[in-house]
């Protein structure tokens, strides 16, 4: 536990909260109390979760850590209560919440009292939303069970350590349940990344660097002075209509994702995946800063017709922007949504409708810019903004 804290937090800044909580034995489980004592000696920790304030690159955060060495990082009442209290402190202090998991799931020795921590943690997550503070989750090795299927899956940004086993259940349990051998890639960080279930995959040694970049990007706005902003160039009013159409179809025109990255101040923290099993390359999304202000950037890539997953990813990103209270800037360049049978089976019309609903209900400013083609409902869903501009 101490080693993980040292890897993530600034030296000497992590201050674990001493709350006096101790695990009960609600089921009178044989040898449970002695197992707890042995686990504490082995892990040099009184429970599977340790939490408290710290700084990361001099930025204040609340940090909660699961320790796999304490009974497999299993979640009992005390572990759940500590995650809840850490979330509540982050909301009260109005600082980001960082969670690093390494857990096999709920602790069977505490039965339903352990499983009851799942909705409790989810409820506490809403307080962080009300405070408009970001939640970053690091999925360590392993992350399975009730922790993943509750609080860990609800982060704004999710990064997986490259060696992590990740899944609703462990691979051995899954194999026993199905009666079939699993693919080699199943339950791996690389599989989660490929299927759009996490935003980034890094080595354990690179997690801190990811956190530093993400926290810098999500820091409070520091708007640039108007005098520092570049002057815009308006298009001539007498542009020939057909010339304008031809320019929107020019194969040499900039790609929208490249344009998005070119206008941000520094880092572009990409958000990948629809959290339903796919990451569609037709839509690039990310958190960034433009002229000192935080923005959610979304950009359609004209080389790919957006499938349902692109619109589901956009819904997810609009929701994140709403939780954090930051505007959404969308760059549109598409001939239209993918009309294939696969997209129809995936519910493309339903996905477009859901995005229209999310855009129109978003509690933050939305700016959409047509940088090339803006055809059909495939573009319209992303153009339902407060301000629509044609490039």
Image (cartoon, rainbow, N blue to C red):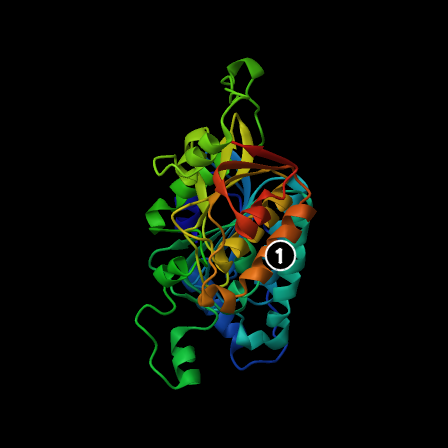
Indicate whether 19 appears above or below 179: above
User: In x, y percent, where is residue 340?
Assistant: 45, 63
Front residue of this view, candidates 91 and 216: 216
User: In x, y percent, where is residue 326?
Assistant: 61, 38
* Residue extending furthest toward the bottom: 179
Front residue of this view, candidates 239 and 274: 239
Q: Can residue 11 be seen in this view?
A: no
Label 1: state its secondary structure: helix
* Residue extending furthest toward the top: 227
Indicate whether 316 appears above or below 237: below
From the viewer's perspective, is 112 left or right of 201? right
10 Å neighbourhood of mark 1: few (<14), some, or many (≥20)?
A: some
Residue at the image point whose x is 57% and y is 61% from the top = 349
Q: Can residue 23 be seen in this view?
A: yes
Residue topped by disc 1: 354
User: In x, y percent, where is residue 221?
Assistant: 58, 29
């Amino acid at each position: 536990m101490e080693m993980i804290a040292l890897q993530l937090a600034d030296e000497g800044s992590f201050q674990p909260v001493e709350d006096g909580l101790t695990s009960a034995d609600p089921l009178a489980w044989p040898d449970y109390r002695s197992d707890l004592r042995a686990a504490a000696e082995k892990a040099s920790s009184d429970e599977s979760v340790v939490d408290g304030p710290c700084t990361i690159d001099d930025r204040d955060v609340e940090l909660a850590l699961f320790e796999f060495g304490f009974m497999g990082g299993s979640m009992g009442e005390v572990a759940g209560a500590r995650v809840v209290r850490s979330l509540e402190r982050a909301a009260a202090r109005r600082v980001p919440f960082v969670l690093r998991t390494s857990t096999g799931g709920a602790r069977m020795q505490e039965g339903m009292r352990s499983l009851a921590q799942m909705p409790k943690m989810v409820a506490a997550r809403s307080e962080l939303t009300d405070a408009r503070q970001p939640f970053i989750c690091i999925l360590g090795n392993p992350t399975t069970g009730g922790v993943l299927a509750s609080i860990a899956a609800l982060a704004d940004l999710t990064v997986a350590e490259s060696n992590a086993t990740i899944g609703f259940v462990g691979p051995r349990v899954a194999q026993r349940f199905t009666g079939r051998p699993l693919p080699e890639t199943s339950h791996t960080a690389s599989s989660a990344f490929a299927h759009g279930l996490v935003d980034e995959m890094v080595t354990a040694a690179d997690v801190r660097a990811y956190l530093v970049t993400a926290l810098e990007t999500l820091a409070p706005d520091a708007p640039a002075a108007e005098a520092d902003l570049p002057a815009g160039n308006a298009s001539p009013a007498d542009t020939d209509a057909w010339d304008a159409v031809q320019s929107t179809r020019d194969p040499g025109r900039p790609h929208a994702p490249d344009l998005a990255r070119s206008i941000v101040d520094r880092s572009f923290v990409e958000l990948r995946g629809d959290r339903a099993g796919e990451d569609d390359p037709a839509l690039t999304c990310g958190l960034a800063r433009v002229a000192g202000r935080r923005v959610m950037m979304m950009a359609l890539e004209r080389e790919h017709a957006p499938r349902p997953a692109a619109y589901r990813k956009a819904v997810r990103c609009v929701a994140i922007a709403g939780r954090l209270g930051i505007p959404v800037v969308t760059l549109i360049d598409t001939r239209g949504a993918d009309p294939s049978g696969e997209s129809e089976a995936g519910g493309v019309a339903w996905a477009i409708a859901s995005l229209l609903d999310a855009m129109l209900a978003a509690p933050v400013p939305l700016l959409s810019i047509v940088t090339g083609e803006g055809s059909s409902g495939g573009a319209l869903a992303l153009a339902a903004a407060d301000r629509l501009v044609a490039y």
